[in-house]
Amino acid sequence: MLSTNIADLRNHLTRYLKEVRAGEEIVVRDRQLPFAKIVPFANAGQAEDLGLVAAGLMRKAERALPASFWRVRRACVGRKAAANAVGRDRDED
């Protein structure tokens, strides 16, 4: 976490904003007393997610998936079987 006073922030704003874009947090001081913090709003992926959540098209996860989820074996479906299934699905519409 970086810390700076108002005058330095004003004089080097572009540099500090680049740091924030890179994920850094900046504490802003007035006469050595901290009074504000500049934090990254969200990274690109999170910004998209927030838009989808706001539109009601997605829900945020309540908790992370357990590691065991990623070790579960998936069913093997051949290319031909998958293509046939897609073709049948399209024919029904």
Image: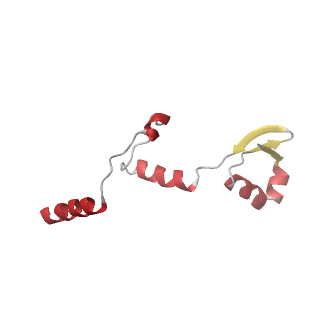
Quarter assignment of residue 2? top right
For the residue pair 80 and 36, the one nearer the viewer reads as 80
Residue 11 appears anywhere in the view: yes
Q: Is residue 72 left or right of residue 39?
A: left
87 versus 43 height, above or below: below
Residue in the image at 53% along x and 50% along y: 46
Say how many tags the image has: 0
Quarter assignment of residue 16? bottom right
Which residue sits furthest left? 92
How does the figure colour the protein chain or chains?
secondary structure
User: x, y (%) of residue 86?
Assistant: 23, 62
Residue in the image at 21% along x and 59% along y: 85
User: x, y (%) of residue 62?
Assistant: 44, 34
21 versus 60 height, above or below: below
Quarter assignment of residue 93? bottom left
Looking at the rendered image, the quarter that the N terminus falls into is top right
Residue 61 appears anywhere in the view: no
For the residue pair 23 and 83, the one nearer the viewer reads as 83
Residue in the image at 82% along x and 47% along y: 4
Residue in the image at 30% along x and 58% along y: 78
User: x, y (%) of residue 21?
Assistant: 67, 55
91 versus 33 height, above or below: below
